[in-house]
């Protein structure tokens, strides 16, 4: 069975209720609005209406005159044709009205639908209001707990290099004193895990900070001790140098039989030979190297790397002659000393050079007395 088989069908009774063929009037038909609207809504109505109307029109038209030579005949045909046109206009206008009413129907239906929707939405919201409020409160509760747990986890994430020991301890106290909210419900376990992890992380950060500070304090203490030892060693070195200088003075006094007197007239200083000048330069370089080595050894001793014991002095005093010879030799020595000093050699170095020459420690170089 097809769709057309189940569609409503128009009957002669439907047509008779819709239109009535009349002999008088502007048109050949009169129309029942309700009947015609119903008939127009049924497929296949037009041919049936036309069959009834057209049969009546043609039957009446057969009696019209064929001769159009008179005005009466022409007027009769004109009037008959006008009634046909009026019948067409009447039926078409009534059909258009049906269409217009049908076009307005969706707007009417939509308006009624909206009223129903709005009203039932309001009733729905009113009835559901307690549940909706509970759901909103529950969503806010979960949001707050999630935010607090994130904050708690962040407390344990700390760069101990940037924070002092006191700051880390304060944060540990803050996290330790944190209480899990009463309404935590399903978040309680997450709170406990996060708090425990934060405290463990903070404890590790505190241990690292304390170790770092302790090591820094120890290093600072060692630096201060090393500096104090360096100052003490410098003072001791000064005293040792002064003692050596005095010992050298006494030694020269013993060698010459008199003390060095800068104001006492002495023979003119002899000119230094090239070999003697070279010797003085070499002695200065050796002393500078010894001083550098001693400074290095001193630094190594301060830092605890190793310790170097000084080599004992094995120098033996030379044999001295009579007083006159001693005085002569002392004068030559003083002249040589002044010659060294006047040529830019430090006093202590010059004294050492003269001593080495006098004791025969420098091959091929002697002082002529």
Image (spheres, rainbow, N blue to C red):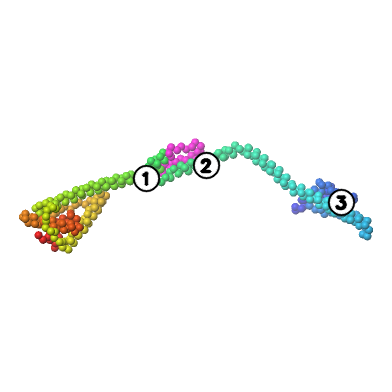
| Residue 185 x %, y % | 51, 38
Read off the residue under disc 3.
Answer: 27
Asked if the magenta segment contains residue 196, the reply would be yes
Q: Residue at x 23, y 47 (%)?
A: 232
Q: Are marks 3 and 2 in contact (CB under 8 Å)?
A: no
Mark number for residue 208?
1
| Residue 147 x %, y % | 49, 42
Q: Nearer the viewer, mark 3 or mark 2?
A: 3
Is residue 271 placed above or below 219 in the rendered structure?
Answer: below
Q: Nearer the viewer, mark 3 or mark 1?
A: 3
Q: Residue at x 65, y 38 (%)?
A: 123
The one nearer the camera, 204 or 95, is 95
Helix, strand or loop at disc 3? loop
Is residue 332 placed above or below 149 in the rendered structure?
Answer: below
Helix, strand or loop at disc 1? helix
Mark number for residue 6?
none
Asked if one can make out residue 52 in the rendered structure from this viewpoint, the answer is no
| Residue 349 x %, y % | 18, 56
Left/right placement of residue 154 relative to residue 210 reads: right
Tell me the quarter of the image containing the C terminus: bottom left
Q: Residue at x 59, y 39 (%)?
A: 132
What stretch of residues is rendered in magenta?
174-201
Report, in whole angstroms, how far the alpha carbon at label 2 lies from the one at label 1: 35 Å
Mark number for residue 143?
2
């Amino acid at each position: 069975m097809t769709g057309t088989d189940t569609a409503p069908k128009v009957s002669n009774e439907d047509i008779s209720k819709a239109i009535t063929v009349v002999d008088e009037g502007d048109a050949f038909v009169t129309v029942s609005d309700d009947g015609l609207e119903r008939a127009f809504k049924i497929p296949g109505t037009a041919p049936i209406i036309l069959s009834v109307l057209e049969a009546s029109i043609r039957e009446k038209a057969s009696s019209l005159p064929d001769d159009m030579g008179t005005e009466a005949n022409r007027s009769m045909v004109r009037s008959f044709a006008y009634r046909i046109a009026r019948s067409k206009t009447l039926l078409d206008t009534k059909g258009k009205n049906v269409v217009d009413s049908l076009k307005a129907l969706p707007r009417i239906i939509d308006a009624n639908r909206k009223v129903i929707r709005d009203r039932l939405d309001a009733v729905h919201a009113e009835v559901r209001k307690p549940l909706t409020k509970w759901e909103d409160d529950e969503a806010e509760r979960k949001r707050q707990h999630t935010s607090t747990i994130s904050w708690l986890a962040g407390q344990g994430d700390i760069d101990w290099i940037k924070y002092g020991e006191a700051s880390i301890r304060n944060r540990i106290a803050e996290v330790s004193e944190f209480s899990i909210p009463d309404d935590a419900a399903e978040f309680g376990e997450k709170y406990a895990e996060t708090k425990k992890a934060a405290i463990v992380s903070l404890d590790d950060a505190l241990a690292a900070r304390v170790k770092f500070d302790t090591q820094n304090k120890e290093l600072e203490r060692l630096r201060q001790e090393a500096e104090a030892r360096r100052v003490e060693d410098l003072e001791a070195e000064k005293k040792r140098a002064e003692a050596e200088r005095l010992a050298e003075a006494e030694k020269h006094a013993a060698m010459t039989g008199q003390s060095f007197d800068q104001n006492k007239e002495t023979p003119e200083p002899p000119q230094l030979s090239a070999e003697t000048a070279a010797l003085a330069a070499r002695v200065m370089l050796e002393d500078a190297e010894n001083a550098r080595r001693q400074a290095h050894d001193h630094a190594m001793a301060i830092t605890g790397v190793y310790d170097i014991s000084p080599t004992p002095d094995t120098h033996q005093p030379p044999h001295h002659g009579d007083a006159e010879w001693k005085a002569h030799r002392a004068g030559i020595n003083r002249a040589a000393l002044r010659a060294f000093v006047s040529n830019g050699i430090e006093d202590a170095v010059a004294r050492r050079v003269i001593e080495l020459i006098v004791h025969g420690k420098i091959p091929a170089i002697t002082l002529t007395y």
